[in-house]
């Protein structure tokens, strides 16, 4: 493993854990965390053999891959920018897998929260009603009953760490 790859992984881990800490404490992810990851990802890949396009493609995919959940109010802008930073640091393939695993973890966390709060049936009913109203052009989607959200950085960090482990073992 090259020194540059170790530095990129270190920057990734610092970015992830800062974002998680702040999201757990404040309920948001600050631009100074995500933009630092993006800028360092671009610089480190520009100086290495992968180049700036590697970073820019990863950044772009990271920013757009969860755009629909963001537009529907299911994710915050900080979550999207965190995925952009992951992409800028690690590239398209990595951010694709990290987002896929993060979405899966996010779904598991949401399901566990609904079961714990005994709100699975009411949440499912609300989602179906919202989809029905959207189809009939009555109202926009609203999948988030009050009190059902959680700091999504938890899912992103978990998914990214699992992806990093897979990468190191040659799985992606």
Image (tube, rainbow, N blue to C red):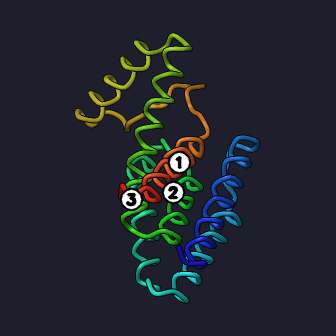
Q: CA distance from mark 3 to mark 2?
A: 27 Å
Are the two marked residues, 2 and 1, in contact with CB atoms closer than 8 angstroms? no
Tell me the SS state at disc 2. helix
Give the numbered dot on residue 170.
Answer: 3
Note whether 95 is above or below 158 in the view shown: below
Q: Residue at x 62, y 77 (%)?
A: 40
Give the numbered dot on residue 156.
Answer: 1
Tell me the SS state at disc 3. loop
Note whether 160 is above or below 134 in the view shown: below
Give the numbered dot on residue 80.
Answer: 2
Number of numbered discs present? 3
Left or right of 53, for residue 9: right
Q: Position of residue 29 (x, y in %)?
A: 66, 53
- N-terminal of the pair, mark 2 or mark 1, is 2
Q: Which image quadrant for residue 152?
A: top right
- N-terminal of the pair, mark 1 or mark 3, is 1
Note whether 164 is above or below 142 in the view shown: below
């Amino acid at each position: 493993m090259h020194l540059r790859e170790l530095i990129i992984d270190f920057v990734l881990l610092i970015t992830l854990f800062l974002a998680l800490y702040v999201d757990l404490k404040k309920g948001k992810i600050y631009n100074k965390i995500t933009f630092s990851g993006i800028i360092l990802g671009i610089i480190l890949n520009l100086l290495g053999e992968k180049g700036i396009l590697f970073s820019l493609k990863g950044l772009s995919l990271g920013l757009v891959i969860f755009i629909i959940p963001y537009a529907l109010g299911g994710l915050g802008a900080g979550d999207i920018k965190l995925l952009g930073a992951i992409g800028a640091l690690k590239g398209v393939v990595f951010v694709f897998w990290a987002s896929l695993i993060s979405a899966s973890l996010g779904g598991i966390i949401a399901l566990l929260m609904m079961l714990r709060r005994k709100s699975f049936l009411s949440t499912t009913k609300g989602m179906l009603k919202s989809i029905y109203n959207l189809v009939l052009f009555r109202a926009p989607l609203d999948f988030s009953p009050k009190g059902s959200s959680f700091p999504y950085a938890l899912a992103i960090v978990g998914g990214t760490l699992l992806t990093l482990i897979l990468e190191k073992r040659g799985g992606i």
